[in-house]
């Protein structure tokens, strides 16, 4: 890529710059402003942590939904196999084990 060797006319205010090769003399010149950039760097680091936590929460919510789906399907198949008609699958927003018909819950099974 030797754009600076072109013979065609350049109609921009930076025509002299276009005719020069890329240089690296300005590499690192930002360092003299690093003290002023530090609050931005810290804010971006904190934002990165927040985004990572949000991503983890979203993954956990998807896993919870999958577990509830599998659990409810299991309870439905258990109801069909045992004949218990009192299965009450947990809603998505409830934690704990409040189902009326679970394997090992003989009282609920015997009531049929």
Image (cartoon, rainbow, N blue to C red):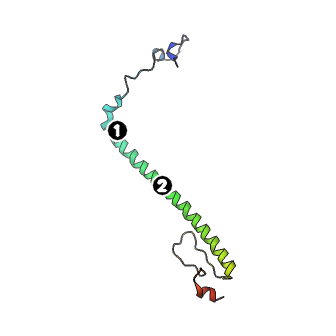
Quadrant of the image occupied by residue 73:
bottom right
The answer to which of 105 and 4 lies nearer the viewer is: 105
The residue pinned by badge 2 equals 54
Residue plotted at (52% across, 20% down): 1
Are dots 1 and 2 in contact, CB under 8 Å?
A: no
Residue plotted at (30% across, 37% down): 35
Secondary structure beneath dot 1 equals: helix
Residue 110 showing in the rendered view = yes
**Residue 12 x/y as whole percent:** 50, 17
The answer to which of 93 and 28 lies nearer the viewer is: 28
Badge 2 local density, few (<14 within 10 Å), some, or many (20+)? few
Q: Nearer the viewer, mark 1 or mark 2?
A: 2
Residue plotted at (34% across, 43% down): 39
The answer to which of 101 and 82 lies nearer the viewer is: 82
Badge 1 local density, few (<14 within 10 Å), some, or many (20+)? few
Quadrant of the image occupied by residue 9:
top right
**Residue 76 x/y as whole percent:** 66, 74
**Residue 72 x/y as whole percent:** 62, 71
> Of callouts 1 and 2, which one flags the residue occurring earlier in the amino acid sequence?
1
Quadrant of the image occupied by residue 29:
top left
Horizontal side of 12 relative to 87 (left or right) equals left
The residue pinned by badge 1 equals 37
Vertical arrangement, residue 43 with respect to residue 78, above or below: above
């Amino acid at each position: 890529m030797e754009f600076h060797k072109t013979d065609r006319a350049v109609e921009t205010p930076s025509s002299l710059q276009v005719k020069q090769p890329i240089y690296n003399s300005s590499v690192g010149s930002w360092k003299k402003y690093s003290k002023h950039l530090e609050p931005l760097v810290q804010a971006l680091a904190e934002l990165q942590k927040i985004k990572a936590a949000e991503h983890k929460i979203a993954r956990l919510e998807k896993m919870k939904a999958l577990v509830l789906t599998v659990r409810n399907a299991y309870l439905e198949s258990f109801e069909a196999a045992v004949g218990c008609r009192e299965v009450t699958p947990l809603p998505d927003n409830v934690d704990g084990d409040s189902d009326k018909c679970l394997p090992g819950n003989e009282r609920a099974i015997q009531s049929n």
